[in-house]
Amino acid sequence: MQCSIYKGTKKIGHYLYIEKRDDFSRVPQALVDMLGQLELVISLELSAKRQLAQANVNDVMQQLTEQGYYFQIPPRTGEELLSQRTPG
């Protein structure tokens, strides 16, 4: 499965995966607006054997097929999680 990955100017560490380069027709406009100007990072071929740095390739392929895009957000750090704890 072919895939193009984009990053936006407004959300650092967030990535948008789509099947066809520059075809955002299945991506909600609100998501595109939230990301800002989109810049192509890489185009690659996805397969069950391929590993991605921060996403499960099978989840990515499933979401690309079902909804037309996959949205990757940066993983939360332990410090971020601790700062959201409410005092007990």
Image (cartoon, rainbow, N blue to C red):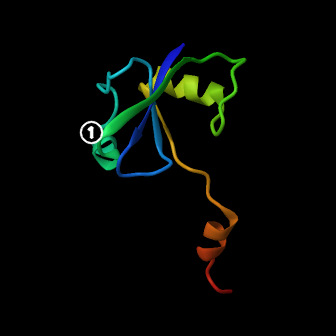
Residue pushed farthest bottom? 88
Seen from the viewer's position, the closer of residues 8 and 83 is 8
Seen from the viewer's position, the closer of residues 6 and 84 is 6
Vertical side of 84 occupied by 21: above or below: above
Vertical side of 11 occupied by 71: above or below: above
Residue 84 place in picture, x, y as percent: 59, 73
The residue identified by callout 1 is 29
Q: Quadrant of residue 68?
A: top left
As drawn, is 74 to the left or to the right of 32?
right
Residue at figure coordinates x 39%, y 17% from the top left: 20
Image label count:
1
Residue at figure coordinates x 35%, y 52% from the top left: 10
As drawn, is 72 to the left or to the right of 83?
left
Residue at figure coordinates x 41%, y 51% from the top left: 11
Determine whether the residue tagged by mark 1 lies in a helix, strand or loop.
Answer: helix
Q: Quadrant of residue 39?
A: top left
Q: Quadrant of the C terminus?
A: bottom right
Q: Quadrant of residue 58?
A: top right
Residue 56 place in picture, x, y as percent: 66, 32
Residue 63 place in picture, x, y as percent: 51, 28
As drawn, is 60 to the left or to the right of 49?
left
Q: Quadrant of the N terminus?
A: top right
How many other residues sit within 10 Å of disc 1, few (<14), some (14-19) or many (≥20)? few
Vertical side of 88 occupied by 31: above or below: above
Residue pushed farthest right? 49
Residue 38 place in picture, x, y as percent: 34, 37
Q: Amino acid at mark 1?
A: Gln
